[in-house]
Amino acid sequence: MVDKEIVYSAIVPFYNEEDSVLPLYNKLKKVLIDLGKHEIIFVDDGSTDKTFLRLRECAQIDKQVRIIKFRRNFGQSAALTSGFDHATGDIIITVDADLQNDPKDIPKLLEKLQEGYDTICGWRKHRKDRFLRKKVPSKVFNWFCRKISGQNIHDFGSTLRVYKRQVVKNISVYGELHRFIPVLVAWKGYKVSETEVKHHPRKYGKTKYGGGRLVRGLLDILTVYFLEKYLSRPMHLFGTLGILSIGLGTAIGAYLSILRILFNVPLSDRPLLLLAILMVVFGVQFLTLGLIGEMMTRNRYETGNKKPYDIEVLLNFKHALGSGTFERRKTVLENH
């Protein structure tokens, strides 16, 4: 049973999805009306087509629709973060804008949430995407993420998820870390699970993800792993690397000393050995600088006031900035 006293906040990030706006609004609205009190937060992530105009039409007829419009494209993590920052509901729902997620699956996720979990992820077990372009990279990516994170989640890329309010208010998401929200919240001690959901073929527009997404995703999960494991004790990481580096250098030095002292072998004609030593040293330096940079980035967003987005317009929020709040109500838009 769904608790009618709970307030639900549905967050949908949009980027050049003008044809999907009205169909998604109608499908999502029907589900939320059945749930009870709700708000819909549409985030326009710097679209260059008519997405914002379509979103504004929804806001004109429905005061429960809030619009956040970015000045430019900041990415899905920033779009979700802005939605989390502005959401007022007890339960937060995230949905993709491309109509491949089915809003009718939301009650199923909410039922699973009532079993004592804090976050429920949608598992697109039977994806309706191209096999080589998306399914195969996705399987590799998800397998790697499970091994690194230790979380038995089958679909890290699914946006269809539900969260308890305290979960999203207690995490910082930037860059492209939105895929790893389940990992971040699980490592903070929250209970995470998943349930199977439907997945539809893309009907409008083009996918926003290219072949480079797999590589970036693998680098991101490594970043998350190192930050969560070593952020509070960086000496465990850097000290280990330092000891290994010193040990390797000492072993090489001992080997060269033996050659020179016992066998009288000259050391001036070993450029490959010098090159190997330099490569190890430079590799450790680059890795260290990269991790320090990631730590500084996280510290910037978690302890400072800097947000990973810049808002141009807010619509239908109580204290909206920008072009004001719409109060008119009309008949619910029908699907085109």
Image (cartoon, grey):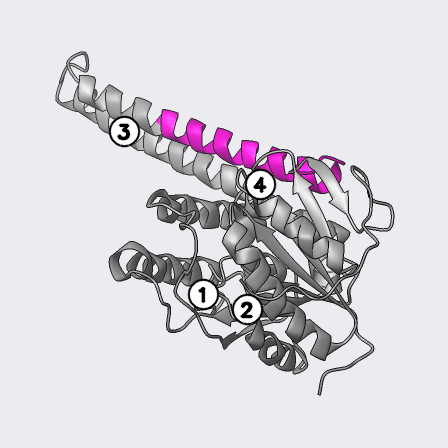
Q: Which amino acid type is marked by label 3? A: Ile
Pointer 2 with pointer 1, Cβ within 8 A: yes
Q: CA distance from mark 3 to mark 1?
A: 45 Å
State the residue position of label 2. 121
Q: Residue 125: horizontal and vertical position, in percent? A: 40, 73
Identify the mark at residue 234; answer none if there is no mark.
4
Q: Residue 2: horizontal and vertical position, in percent? A: 72, 83
Which one is in front, 88 or 167? 88
Identify the mark at residue 155; answer none if there is no mark.
1
The structure residue drawn at horizontal position 70% and vertical position 42%, both measured from the top left corner, is 302
Q: Which amino acid type is marked by label 4? A: Pro
User: Which of the 4 image quadrants contains residue 135?
Assistant: bottom left
Span of residues in magenta: 281-308
For marks 3 and 1, the one nearer the N-term is: 1
User: Which of the 4 image quadrants contains residue 162?
Assistant: bottom right
Element class at badge 3:
helix
For marks 3 and 2, the one nearer the N-term is: 2
Mark 4 burial class by Cα count in 10 Å: few <14, some 14-19, many 20+:
some
Identify the mark at residue 252; answer none if there is no mark.
3
Mark 1 burial class by Cα count in 10 Å: few <14, some 14-19, many 20+:
many
The structure residue drawn at horizontal position 61% and vertical position 66%, both measured from the top left corner, is 334
